[in-house]
Image: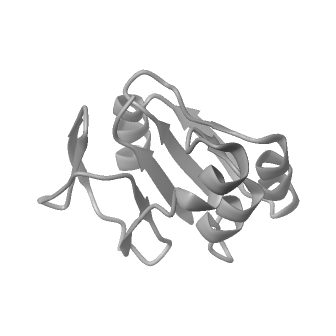
């Protein structure tokens, strides 16, 4: 079941009544996981650019849409390799500032996954 995101502020996100103080993934089955930023940081020296390895970790087989909250000030983005990976998997990607991504998540239907960057 898809959990409802109640709110986000700089440095936190409230999902289904639980406060998270780190970036999170929401899996197809509704599980909430901590983002593995090191998969991108090891390659690019920053976690603000999503690598192919991180894209592979994010993706759940059967996902048709990925909603990315790219930060309160929209600082995170996908690498070209990550974009191509999602295209090849037939998974549409929406990249929005985290507050807008929360609204998109809560209004989404179907086979959707999410990643939410809670700072910058």
For the C terminus, the quadrant is top left
Q: Position of residue 98 (x, y in %)?
A: 40, 34
Q: Where 93 sits versus 90, above or below? A: above
In the displayed structure image, the side of residue 65 where residue 22 appears, left or right:
left
For the N terminus, the quadrant is bottom left
Residue appearing at x 55%, y 59% in the figure = 38
Q: Where 86 sits versus 103, above or below? A: below
Residue 62 in view:
yes
Residue sitting nearer the eye, 96 or 45: 45
Q: Where 110 sits versus 23, above or below? A: below
Residue sitting nearer the eye, 112 or 85: 85
In the displayed structure image, the side of residue 112 where residue 78 appears, left or right:
right
Q: Position of residue 110 (x, y in %)?
A: 53, 63
Residue appearing at x 22%, y 44% in the figure = 12
Indicate the quadrant where residue 104 lies.
top left
Residue sitting nearer the eye, 85 or 29: 85
Indicate the quadrant where residue 80 lies.
top right
**Residue occupying the far left of the picture:** 17
Residue sitting nearer the eye, 67 or 107: 67
Q: Where 32 sits versus 52, above or below? A: below
Residue 110 in view:
no
Residue appearing at x 38%, y 52% in the figure = 23
Q: Position of residue 37 (x, y in %)?
A: 52, 56
The total number of labels drawn is: 0
**Residue occupying the far top of the picture:** 73
In the displayed structure image, the side of residue 105 where residue 36 appears, left or right:
right
């Amino acid at each position: 079941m898809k959990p409802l995101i109640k709110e986000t502020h700089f440095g936190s996100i409230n999902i289904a009544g639980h406060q998270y103080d780190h970036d999170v993934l929401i899996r197809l089955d509704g599980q909430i996981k901590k983002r593995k930023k090191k998969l991108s940081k090891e390659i690019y020296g920053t976690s603000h650019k999503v690598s192919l390895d991180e894209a592979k970790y994010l993706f759940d087989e059967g996902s048709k849409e990925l909603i990315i909250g790219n930060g309160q000030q929209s600082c995170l983005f996908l690498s070209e390799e990550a974009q191509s990976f999602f295209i090849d998997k037939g998974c549409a990607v929406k990249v929005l500032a985290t507050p807008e991504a929360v609204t998109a998540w809560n209004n989404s239907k179907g086979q959707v996954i999410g990643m939410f960057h809670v700072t910058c």
